[in-house]
Every structure is written in C-alpha cells, then in structure tokens.
Image (cartoon, rainbow, N blue to C red):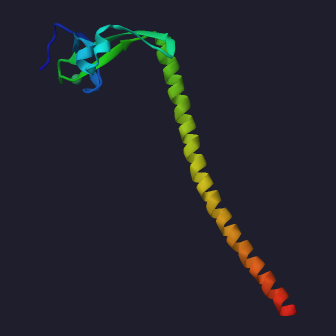
Amino acid sequence: MRVTKGGTDMYCPSCKEVTTCKAVPAAQVTYNPSDYGQRKYYIKHDDIQFFQRGRECLSCGHEFVSAEVDLQFLEELVELRDALSEIKGNAEAYVKESAAASVSLEKLSESLGVLRALKVYKSAKKS
Ligand SMILES: [Zn+2]
C-alpha cells in the first residue's frame, strides 16, 4: 500500500529505502508513557537534546521513532562507531594472538619439562 499524501518521505529502517511515513505518537511505538513528550534529553548527557517523533511506514506498516538531532552529533556518533569498530578489530586480533602465544608458551613449558627430565636422568646416570 503506497500512499502519496498524508506523510513525510523518509528512510524506513524496515523497508531500507525512502518511503512515505505518517506521524504517530512516539509513546504508541515505544509503549512508554514518558515518550508522550517530543522534547527529550539524556540525564547523563544533557548536551544531547533532541526531538523524537513516532513514525509509521505507509508501505510496510513498520512503526519506529525518529530523532531530530544536530548534524554535528551524528558525525561524532559515526566517528565513535568507526573508533569502536577499530578497537573491536584490535581486541579480536589480541585475543587470537594471545591464544597462539598461550599455545606456544605451553609447548615451551613441555620442552623445558623434557629438558629438566633429561638433566635429572643424566645426573642420575653419573652417580
Ligand atoms: Zn517500511
């Protein structure tokens, strides 16, 4: 069902394309009574102030909440996401390398054990 009037063309996260979405109360989407107001902020991040709007995609019926934020905040979010992705990649490499190092250390310990046993054997043979 595609309706050309009575909505705003915007990206639907379900359709993954620009569709016409109508405004609905955000609380209708979240089932959270505190979402009746449009003006929102995070208590621990009061520099992040935004307006939220409930949306219903007129193509697929998916309901979601959109937020109107300062573009600079969005760009900061993208930078943080990239940095987090890099940290995650490094952490995965670290875990992989440390597992390999652990195996090497275990083999080294076994070798040392063999050497110690040989030394004990040799010294026992001499006496
Ligand atoms: Zn949709």
45 versus 115 height, above or below = above
In depth, the one of 30 and 75 nearer the eye is 30
Q: Quadrant of the C terminus?
A: bottom right
Q: Residue at x 70, y 68 (%)?
A: 108
Report the image quarter containing ligand 1. top left
Instruction: From the viewer's side, name the closer residue of 32 and 83.
Output: 32
Residue 47: x and y, percent? Answer: 51, 10
Residue farthest toward the right in the current orientation of the protein: 127
For the point 77% across and 83% down, the residue is 118
Measuring from the top left, give residue 103's x and y in whole percent. 62, 63
Q: Residue at x 25, y 19 (%)?
A: 29
State the residue in front, 35 or 55: 35
Q: Toward the viewer: 42 or 66?
A: 42
Measuring 14% from the left and 13% from the top, which residue is drawn there? 3
Quarter of the image where one finds residue 17: top left
Question: Which quarter shows the N terminus?
Answer: top left
Horizontally, residue 52 falls left or right of residue 109, namely: left
Could you tell me residue 87's position as x and y percent?
57, 36
Give the left or right position of residue 42, taking residue 123 as reference. left
Quadrant of the image occupied by residue 109: bottom right
